Amino acid sequence: MSTHESDVHTLSQELPAMFDGMKLAAVATVLYVIVRCLNLKSPTAPPDLTYQDTPLNRFLLKSCPQLTKEYIPPLLWGKSGHLQTALYGKLGRVSSPNPSGIRKYLPMHDGATATFDLFEPLKDHPTGEDITMVICPGIGNHSEKHYVRTFVDYAQKDGYRCAVLNHLGALPNIELTSPRMFTYGCTWEFAAMVGYIKRAYPDTQLIVVGFSLGGNIVCKFLGENRTNQERVLCCVSVCQGYSALRAQETFLQWDQFRRFYNFLMADNMKKIILSHRHSLFGGSSLKKIDMEPSRLYTATSLMQIDDNIMRKFHGHSSLKEYYEKESCVHYIHNVNVPLLLVNSGDDPLVHDSLLTIPRTLAAKKSNVVFALTLHGGHLGFFEGAVLFPQPLTWMDKVIVGYANAMCQWEKQKPMCQSGESSCEEEKPKHPPPSCPPPRAALRRHLKLRSLRCLLLRCRPPLLTSRPSAPPRLLCVNTVTLQYVNQL
């Protein structure tokens, strides 16, 4: 056999091994990419909580186990914030129910017509009280979105009345009655809905809930005026960004594909605006607010739409002024009712730098609890075993669990303050050291003279005569009085 033939024979033997090695390398590369993209190596853990140690917060953590237990997303894809966000954006929820409500129409001072859907509770609330959840959805959302319907159905079954705001212009079958639609921080429609609920149900107490952009609106609403917090038991905000001015810089970055999400949300906003082009840009309305609809077609980011269209609805002179005045970061420190702020660590829309705002607030204010989960994406928070998610999400459960704890606290609080309740957090099980338990104190003071010094003002011996005046007790309680009367 010649040298050439020998080399060819050797190469023919090595080729299958080379191809096998390339196949293994390709499979290993694909698996590595899958593991990295799906974040499969990431652990599961309870939410990272920032709060002050107060009786209310101790009661809350004991009564709302979702805040202290592990949040476990679906194994194969649930640790990817992008897939959680994509599933929320495309499907909303799995097997979403269809609760039955009544649509209400509220005329506004500028000619606009706000709408909200009202859902009555399906059973009595566990506390026996009348409780209404006033809910503000995310950007361009309304009561017909699947994630809203799922949450409303769950809250109804737990005894809550629900009122869900439909953002102005978000419903495709409701025409605008003035040249204005919802903006990042306008609270007018939400305030009108809350006012209606307070008038229609004078005995009801409110629980305020906001999702994403709705979280900014509800926190701004509560902080704008102290009277807005009247009859409000608590507030829950989920996945908001707190400061639009600081967020706009991060939305132009490609980190976590944030620039791509910015483009998708801008495209959705364009569709909503163009569906109301005749109400917004027709005739005298165009001259009135001096908008530039031609620039809307070429906009590729939310900032361009906000600068050319949205800020002019309320007469802001610049985009910076619009973002500063419409962000809740300048108002949220005025909120004094219990406030739960929830964010996800892998939310592709909310940059990590924005989370210093709720973390700092919770460290300074005793009424604020900040919960940061490792996973969940943007309004995802799906739960499940391996592949298929459950209909209810961790987000649904934690909001209702927090609301139940606040309602229970509010019911126990008057009794705790009057000393008639067994509330462990408000009243200790044992008296403080300066007021020892009476039986233990009497056992420690066996001598007659010591016992007389502790309990009685009179001179006669305790065991031989009963004083005419009532004894002066250092530790006044029922057990001591009964013991003394027996003596």
Image: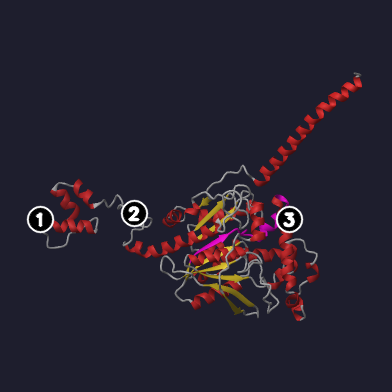
Task: Specify the quadrant of the image occupied by residue 141.
Answer: bottom right
Image spot of residue 29 (x, y percent): 72, 39
Q: Are marks 3 and 2 in contact (CB under 8 Å)?
A: no
Task: Specify the quadrant of the image occupied by residue 110.
Answer: bottom right
Would you name the residue on which mark 1 appears? 460
Image spot of residue 36 (x, y percent): 67, 43
Image spot of residue 32 (x, y percent): 69, 40
- Is residue 245 found inside the magenta-colored segment of the image? yes
Residue type at mark 3 is Phe
Q: Are marks 3 and 1 in contact (CB under 8 Å)?
A: no
Work out which quarter of the rendered image holds the N terminus and state it: top right
Crowd around label 2: few <14 · some 14–19 · many ≥20 (10 Å) = few
Q: Is residue 434 left or right of residue 330?
A: left
Residue type at mark 2 is Pro
Q: Are marks 1 and 2 in contact (CB under 8 Å)?
A: no
Q: Which residues are magenta?
A: 233-255
Residue type at mark 1 is Pro
Color style of the picture: secondary structure
